[in-house]
Image (cartoon, rainbow, N blue to C red):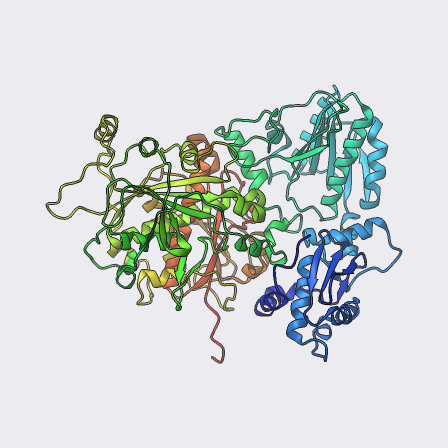
Amino acid sequence: MKATHMSTVLSGAQFSHHNDLYALLPKRPKLIPELIFIPESDTRVAVYGAYQPRILTCVQGINTLAVFLERLDGVNVLESVLTDDATMSRENALGMLSLLFRYGFLEEGEGLDDGAPSHLASYCGRFVDNTRLHANRTAALQSARRRRLALVCPEDVSSLLQHALAPMAASIDVLTERPTSSALPWDDALIIFDGSESDVFRQACADGLHQAGVRYLSCIIGADRTLVGPYTLPNISASYQCARTQCEQPSPANDRQEVAFRAVYAAHELGQILLGLSSESYLNKVVSHSHRGEGEYTLAYKVARIPGTALSGLGHAAYRPPGEEAFTAWQHHIGTRLPPQGLLPPRSHQMHFTLDNLNRHASRPVRLHGQQHINLPDSALAERCPPPWRMSAMPSQPLTLANLGWLLRHATGYQKGEDGTLRRIAPSGGQLLSCDMFVVVRRPLPEIPCGAWFYLGEKHQLVRIDGIDCQQLEHLLQHPEEPISLIISGNLNRVRGKYNDFSYNIVNLDAGVVNQYCALSARAAGWTLREDHGVDLQWLASLLFFTQQDNPHILCQVLHVQAPPSQGEPCPAPLYETASSLVAVSHRPRPAAAPASPTPAALSSLATVHRDEPLSALLERRRATYDYADSPFPETWLNTLIAVAHAGLEQSRLRGMPALPMEPWILLPEASGELAAGIYQCSQADRRYWRKRDSGFGRAHLADCINQLAFHKAGALLMWVADLEKTLHDHGAAGYRMQLQNAAASAMQCWLAALDCGLTGTLAGGVIEEGLIRHAGADGYREAPLFCLVLASPPPAEGV
């Protein structure tokens, strides 16, 4: 059982300071009647009956808690529940109420049908918190009972499936012939495959449903395992055939009782979807069941959606190699895209209602490193270096221990408070500590010997990694000439608990943000920074983490840093002077004439208004904000930010990123100057090349394109849209990783430029692909949104 990790004071403070959170509380809070309370002490009570047992703590005593809970009858309005009285202040009442809301103990009393209770209604009440798609059990049942279902299944299980689904559907039709019409009367379908010859007909039905745009859940039942899912959304998710190829097909099922049991299990999963209670956006799991009579348990495995992994421990399963285009296309569409608004918002993306953020933040990641620690001193660069887009000519700074620490602190998101302590703001704002940084020193610097080091940001230290074969490390890094290499790693385990299948995207987006921090800091210091996308990251991870299997970390990117040598200073030889390393360095192909990077003067023309502050101060203001002014977005700043976005993409290419097909789009909910509200495809910085993609897009449609309520009040959204078809064809699965990093790096530069212009906002990964498909005619694959920057003018100060 989970104890309370969040106090009522902290929970209440979050809800009182965020209007969007407060607005989501029930208007007439009602405690779900399925709860069972068991006192543990005078101040603690265990609560059972919801989807997860919890422990509540009330310092005023459980008698005071009982009096407060009596108010939650579904009749009292929210404000009367929170009224001050002799037992509990408004602040304490809001804290306790918000905590009950987070735990799923409350439902909306308004509109709740108090008719005859049923097992299905009770189930909806207990699990409605999984997605919060519906406010109470009545709304969940009413929504499901408006859906019309089609069944494609073996004849001997048809009656069982109809009996299982009848309480939660308006009508059920069993298909006996392939649907050919483009307009079918059904909302959803369930297709059961049992390995028989009739599967050919069922496959034809699936094709017909897909072409007609009918959503369907497929289930393949075999002798020893069952593949449930995916729940296919035509024109949005990949088709059934795409996911089917990921798994070895099971042997035909001859035990008809087993077929019936597995078919009803699939009907239960579809029922979860119809009721809006599924916590997975797309069901896709393998259920293995043994008939050998050895007392083995039935096990369910989620199909892994991380490139390079098999089916979550299902060792006998076959899967497409992760380098193939089909695998990554399937992973992108099935594993990482948010579903349509109002269909299945996954619980993992509504983290205001859970404690995963705090639970992850409280448990420190376990890292492998040695005992030698080097404290990094403060650098004078923090007070001197302006942002690159308004930088005057400055001499390059030496690559010292202090200056290197300045770059590392920026890159990993640590900010120094007034009391001298370091506080972590994760690259994307989520405080998940997803990215770490390794430093490889191949030529000794003052106060730092050669070797592999880990940056311990919370203490601003370099920690030596013991037991690393440095020559093998140099071989994997392909013997770079630069004295310093930076390796960005992502901790998948740390983000997987919060973001599930989106975790691979998150760590690579964060790596792109780290890349941009490094690039800006290196440019401000006058250093050269080169990206190396030819390194075998999997083998490099095995070397750094001493393991080749079940590694929770993945390596995302390798950067090389070098300061220009002083006049007359000879270029020192690499540390590892073996014959092979010297030959590799001397014969490495060099580019003919690399184009010059944009000049500071050219970048300065992109920002029309800025504050007179150094780069360090600007980086320390990069905090996510959700309160926005109710005013149109300034038109000139849109021109500026699109120019910055294209400049950021070009700078990534100059640093070594391949030329990937990507462009920024603008979602403008209200007219701005001569620009009408709409969705604009900005293929170039010049506004003459902007193309309006929508017809009648407005603020009401933002909810279809971005998942958080606060963002619906933004002044403008910038989205980075990639052509995945060309990317995967040219670069395979690595291209998908590079596109995520490319989008995040450009978005981060835009965010900093926006902050410099006095705007506010945040980066966001919760892009709903279906919104662009519906309103802009995007196809979701050749035009796939990867990352988003939410921007607006800041609200006026209080009293102004």
Percent x, y of residue 541: 43, 36
Percent x, y of residue 254: 78, 20
In the displayed structure, 602 sits above or below 593; it is below
Depth check, front residue: 387 or 40:
40
Kindly tell me whether residue 35 is visible in this rendering. Answer: yes
Depth check, front residue: 582 or 754:
582
Splitting the image into 4 quarters, where does residue 287 fall?
A: top right
Q: Residue at x 66, y 70 (%)?
A: 94
Left or right placement of residue 490 versus residue 184 in this view: left
Percent x, y of residue 451: 31, 40
The residue at the far left in this view is 568
Percent x, y of residue 481: 24, 37
Left or right placement of residue 175 versus residue 356 in this view: right
Q: Residue at x 81, y 59 (%)?
A: 33
The residue at the far front in this view is 371
The residue at the far top in this view is 197
Q: Residue at x 51, y 50 (%)?
A: 765
Left or right placement of residue 643 versus residue 42 in this view: left
Depth check, front residue: 703 or 617:
617
The residue at the far right in this view is 116
Depth check, front residue: 45 or 332:
45
